[in-house]
C-alpha cells in the first residue's frame, strides 16, 4: 500500500485532535476522496501515483480497499451501531508518526530538536509531537513555522491576551513581568431534574478577592452554573485570579474545595488537589485548553458529579475527590470563554471600538 495514501487516509481521522472521536464511515470516505481530488490538480499521472493521490471509488487505490487495509492493520477501529463509525487507534497514530518521520530517522530527530529550541526561545508551549512530525513530512522550514505561529498576529490570540489583561485591571489586580497567575473558574454541571434549583457555592482554600461571588448560567446549555462576580454594571463569569506571585513565592501545590448546595437538601463537596508545574508562559488555569497544537493534557476542573470517582460520605452529601496537574502556558494561547455571553459582549464592544478608530 502506498505510504502517502495511508497518510492521507489516517489524516482524515484527525489524529492530532485533542479528542479523537468516531466519525461516520461515509464522512471519512468523502474526506479521503475530496482531499485526494483537490491535490491532484495540475499534477501528472506519474506524480499523482507517486504521492498517493490516485485514490478513487472504483479504480487506482480503491478507497474501500484502503479503509479495509487500515482496519485489518489495526490502524483504525470500527464502532458498530446504527451508523457505522470509525476512529484512529493508538497503533494508528504510532504508524502515522513512523510514516511521517521515516521511522524517527536522524533527520527528523534533528528537526524536532530545532522546533523545540524555537518554542523555548519564544517562551511558547511545545507543539504536539504529531504536529511536529506533520511539519517535517510537509517540509516546513523553521522560518515558516516562526512566521505562521509566532510572528503573524492571530486575532484569537491577541483577543485572549487582551481579555485577561482587561479582567485583571477590572479586578484591580496588578502583575509584574516575573509573576505567575492562577486562573480559577468554578463550574457545576447539573442534571436535567436539577436545572431549575437554586444553587449556592462556597470556595475554601483560596481567597477570591473583595468582590461578591455570584452564580450565573452564561452558556447556551443552562445545565452549567458558573461562579463569577459583578463589578459596577459589568458581569464576569470567566473566573478569578486568586494567586499572583513570582515563581519563588508561588505554591507547588494547592488544596481547594467547592461546596455546592443544590436546592434545600443536596450538597456536593468537591475536593481538588492541584500540583503546579512551571513551564513556558505564566498562566495556570483550571480550564487548561489551548488554541493551537500543544503537548499539554487538556484539563477541565469542573464539578461533574456523574463522571468523577466518589468518596463515601456519612452526611448524605456527595463527596468528590480529584487530583490534577496544571502546567503554565502563555495567556494568549488560552482557549476558553467563547460560549460565555458576558465574554462575547466584551468582544463585541471591543471590536466596535476598534472599528470606529480605523
Image (cartoon, helix red, strand yellow):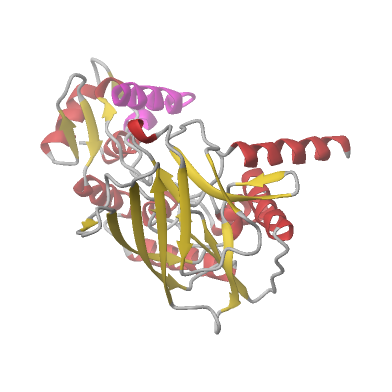
Return the x and y of residue 216 as percentages of the image width and height. 55, 41
* Residue 126 visible in image: no
Rendered view: 77 above or below 231: above
Please report the bounds of the magenta region as a residue range: 27-50
Rendered residue at 66%/45% (across/down): 235
Rendered view: 22 above or below 260: above
Return the x and y of residue 178 as percentages of the image width and height. 64, 76
State the residue lying farthest toward the front.
264
Rendered residue at 45%/57% (across/down): 127
Q: How many marks?
A: 0
Indicate whether residue 48 is drawn in magenta. yes
- Front-most of residues 219 and 312: 312
State the residue lying farthest toward the left.
72
Placement of the N terminus among the 4 image quadrants: top left
Return the x and y of residue 310 as percentages of the image width and height. 23, 55
**Magenta segment, prevailing SS (helix, strand or loop):** helix
Amino acid at each position: 500500500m502506498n505510504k502517502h495514501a495511508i497518510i492521507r487516509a489516517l489524516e482524515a481521522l484527525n489524529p492530532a485532535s485533542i479528542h479523537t472521536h468516531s466519525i461516520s464511515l461515509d464522512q471519512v470516505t468523502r474526506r479521503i476522496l475530496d482531499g485526494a481530488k483537490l491535490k491532484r490538480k495540475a499534477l501528472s499521472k506519474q506524480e499523482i501515483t507517486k504521492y498517493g493521490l490516485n485514490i478513487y471509488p472504483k479504480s487506482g487505490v480503491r478507497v474501500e480497499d484502503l479503509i479495509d487495509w487500515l482496519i485489518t492493520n489495526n490502524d483504525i477501529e470500527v464502532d458498530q451501531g446504527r451508523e457505522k463509525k470509525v476512529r484512529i487507534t493508538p497503533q494508528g497514530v504510532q504508524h502515522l508518526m513512523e510514516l511521517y518521520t521515516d521511522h524517527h530517522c536522524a533527520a527528523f530527530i534533528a528537526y524536532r530538536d530545532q522546533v523545540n529550541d524555537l518554542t523555548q526561545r519564544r517562551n511558547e508551549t511545545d507543539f504536539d509531537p504529531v504536529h511536529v512530525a506533520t511539519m517535517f513530512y510537509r517540509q516546513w522550514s523553521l522560518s515558516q513555522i516562526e512566521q505562521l505561529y509566532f510572528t503573524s498576529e492571530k486575532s484569537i490570540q491577541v483577543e485572549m491576551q487582551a481579555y485577561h489583561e482587561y479582567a485583571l485591571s477590572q479586578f484591580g489586580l496588578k502583575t509584574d513581568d516575573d509573576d505567575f497567575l492562577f486562573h480559577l473558574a468554578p463550574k457545576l454541571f447539573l442534571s436535567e431534574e436539577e436545572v431549575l434549583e437554586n444553587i449556592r457555592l462556597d470556595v475554601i482554600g483560596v481567597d477570591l478577592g473583595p468582590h461578591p461571588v455570584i452564580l450565573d448560567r452564561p452558556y447556551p446549555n443552562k445545565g452549567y452554573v458558573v461562579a463569577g462576580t459583578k463589578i459596577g454594571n459589568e458581569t464576569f463569569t470567566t473566573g478569578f485570579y486568586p494567586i499572583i506571585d513570582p515563581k519563588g513565592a508561588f505554591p507547588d501545590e494547592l488544596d481547594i474545595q467547592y461546596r455546592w448546595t443544590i436546592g434545600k437538601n443536596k450538597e456536593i463537596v468537591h475536593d481538588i488537589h492541584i500540583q503546579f508545574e512551571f513551564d513556558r508562559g505564566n498562566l495556570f488555569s483550571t480550564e487548561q485548553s489551548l488554541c493551537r497544537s500543544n503537548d499539554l493534557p487538556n484539563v477541565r476542573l469542573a464539578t461533574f458529579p456523574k463522571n468523577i470517582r466518589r468518596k463515601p460520605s456519612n452526611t448524605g452529601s456527595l463527596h468528590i475527590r480529584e487530583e490534577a496537574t496544571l502546567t503554565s502556558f502563555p495567556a494568549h494561547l488560552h482557549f476558553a470563554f467563547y460560549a460565555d455571553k458576558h465574554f462575547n459582549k466584551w468582544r463585541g464592544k471591543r471590536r466596535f471600538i476598534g472599528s470606529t478608530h480605523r
